[in-house]
Amino acid sequence: MNELRDEFTDSTPGPFSLGADTHVVILTGAGISAESGLATFRGQGGLWEGHRVEEVASPRAFSRDPRCVWRFYNARRTALKAVEPNAAHRALVSLERYIKDGNFTLITQNVDDLHQRAGSRNILPMHGELVKIRCTECNHLEENRDDLDDFPRCSCGALLRPHIVWFGEMPFYMETIASRMRELDVFIAIGTSGAVYPAAGLVEQAKRSGARTVWINPDEPPFEFSWDEFYRGPAATVVPTLVSRWTGKSV
Ligand code: OAD
């Protein structure tokens, strides 16, 4: 790994070059939305404060107390209305436009819609989306940005649930992710603690595919040996600067 232990500045050297033909896979986590005002999971003021994870984010919790689970996700959805994409979300849109069609994949663990609102297109929200709900029986899926009753129901009569991957459930898009992880040149993780699998295991797949691996975060990465480059700092500062260097355009 490079020796970039100091806070990232305009004069930080690097990074490697990245052309329009490069196959890029980005993995984002809660840290990319921190400067928009959304709390991360594992930091101070974490999202789960006041709620034990198993009270709100598991199929068991939902069958035991759907009201509590719905209230939690209604509050999360309401919080989204007060925040906006930040410079890091926007810079990734510029990067996506610069890279040749089909070569750019944005995998996000975030259930907020800030990447989508910024304009990202090739996005795989592997842990689900707060602004979607689905039926527990017929799998009807719809977008919803409004507050919902404690027991919202589908037209088929069954309970609706948040379109969120709960503990013990399989993340979405795993086959697509596996295929993108076989043909990449560069893997860039932004604002994730690398604590939750299978997302945390993607860097190993990237290494096996021979890709260059890049960690952008104020904190050092777990499994240091897995990363070729480390840019230390907040996403809304580091990502636009790196994207400007790659694309040759100010973002
Ligand atoms: P975490 O809360 O585990 O990690 C957030 C990361 O963001 C930490 O490494 C922080 O150092 C970093 N961070 C904080 N501020 C930042 C900033 N301004 N810029 C860049 N990075 C910053 O969040 P995730 O890794 O996303 O899963 O958590 C992964 C999964 O754990 C979540 O998707 C969620 C949770 O269980 C599900 O709900 C299924």
Image (spheres, helix red, strand yellow):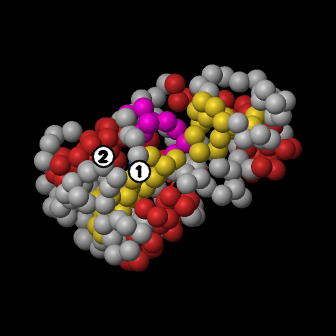
Q: Amino acid at mark 2?
A: Glu
Give above or below for 34 relative to 226.
above
The answer to whether residue 177 of the structure is visible from this angle is yes
Q: What segment is highlighted magenta in the picture?
A: 110-118
Residue appearing at x 56%, y 29% in the figure: 79
The answer to whether residue 190 of the structure is visible from this angle is no
Q: Position of residue 44 (x, y in %)?
A: 53, 47
Q: Which residue corresponds to mark 2?
A: 96
Are dots 2 and 1 in contact, CB under 8 Å? yes
Q: Which residue corresponds to mark 1?
A: 106
Q: Position of residue 66 (x, y in %)?
A: 81, 37
Residue appearing at x 55%, y 54% in the figure: 173
Residue 113 falls within the magenta-colored stretch: yes
Does residue 199 appear left or right of residue 148 in this picture? left
Q: Amino acid at mark 1?
A: Leu
**Disc 1: CA contacts within 10 A as few (<14), some (14-19) or many (>=20):** many
Q: Quadrant of the N terminus?
A: bottom left
Q: Nearer the viewer, residue 45 or 146?
A: 146
Residue appearing at x 71%, y 58% in the figure: 168
Residue 229 falls in which quadrant of the image?
bottom left
**Disc 2: CA contacts within 10 A as few (<14), some (14-19) or many (>=20):** many
Give above or below for 182 relative to 238.
below
SS of the residue under disc 2 = helix
Q: Nearer the viewer, residue 208 or 67?
A: 208
